[in-house]
Image (cartoon, rainbow, N blue to C red):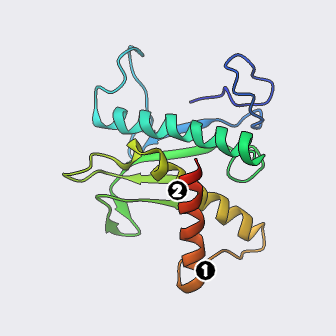
Amino acid sequence: RDISRRAHQTGHNHNGNMKKDAEIRTEHKSEGLITNANNNAWGDTTKQKSGVDAHVYTGKVYDYFFHQLNLNSFDNNGSTMLSVVEVEVKYGEPCPANAYWGQGKVNICVGSQDIKSYSGSLDFVAHEWAHGVTSWASDRGRGETLTPHYESGALNEAFSDWMAAAV
């Protein structure tokens, strides 16, 4: 849990403007909030490694959105940015090497034999958060989103790629 980007939290010089109850939060799919008993040797397990990467990179994405684009979180409302790591199933199918935006959070699947976790890539994490921006910006409570098909799907993916490269 990182609350350092809340409004009026100046101790870490992030100068964020998240809501008073918002945070950057990273959870393990089946175990919830990732914790460490001694808090000094993060990375002892696969879930900690992928969790730390996703957490740090989500903070960097928030900072980029806020300081470069004047966008307060993915929805410009200062909302919590939740990442879930080690996701094993995506829409009923195995998810060994992928990630996706869904249900208001970034879901990062388990790694593969070649890639242990996509959470270790800043542009990958930023790409998924950009899907959150697209979802928020194209819907705005109207129930309309850029569907993952044809031209609108291509625009959705392209926007996320551009944002990832920029971050």
How packed mark 1 is, by other alpha carbons closer than 10 Å (few <14, some 14-19, many 20 or more), is few
Task: Identify the mark nearer the N-term, 2 or 1.
Answer: 2
Is residue 151 shown left or right of residue 125? right
Residue 69 rendering spot, x and y as whole percentages: 74, 48
Would residue 104 be visible to someone looking at this image? no
Asked if 109 appears above or below 23 in the picture, the reply is below
- Circle 2: element type: helix
Residue 160 rendering spot, x and y as whole percentages: 56, 62
Q: Quadrant of the N terminus?
A: top right
Is residue 45 shown left or right of residue 162? left
Residue 25 rendering spot, x and y as whole percentages: 56, 37
For badge 2, the amino acid type reads His
Mark 2 touching mark 1, by CB under 8 A? no
Q: How many marks?
A: 2
Would residue 124 be visible to someone looking at this image? yes
**Which residue lies at the image location 39% right of the left edge and 14% below the top edge?**
40
Residue 149 rendering spot, x and y as whole percentages: 53, 83
Give the residue number, with chain letter if any, for mark 2. 127
For badge 1, the amino acid type reads Ser
**Which residue lies at the image location 75% right of the left edge and 22% below the top edge?**
9
Judging depth in this view, the residue of 127 and 94 nearest the camera is 127
Judging depth in this view, the residue of 46 and 60 nearest the camera is 60
Asked which quadrant contains residue 75, the reply is: bottom right
**Which residue lies at the image location 35% right of the left edge and 34% below the top edge?**
49
| Residue ranking furthest to the left | 113
| Residue ranking furthest to the right | 8
- Circle 1: element type: helix
Asked if 41 appears above or below 18 in the picture, the reply is above
Question: Which dot marks residue 152?
Answer: 1
Judging depth in this view, the residue of 54 and 45 nearest the camera is 54
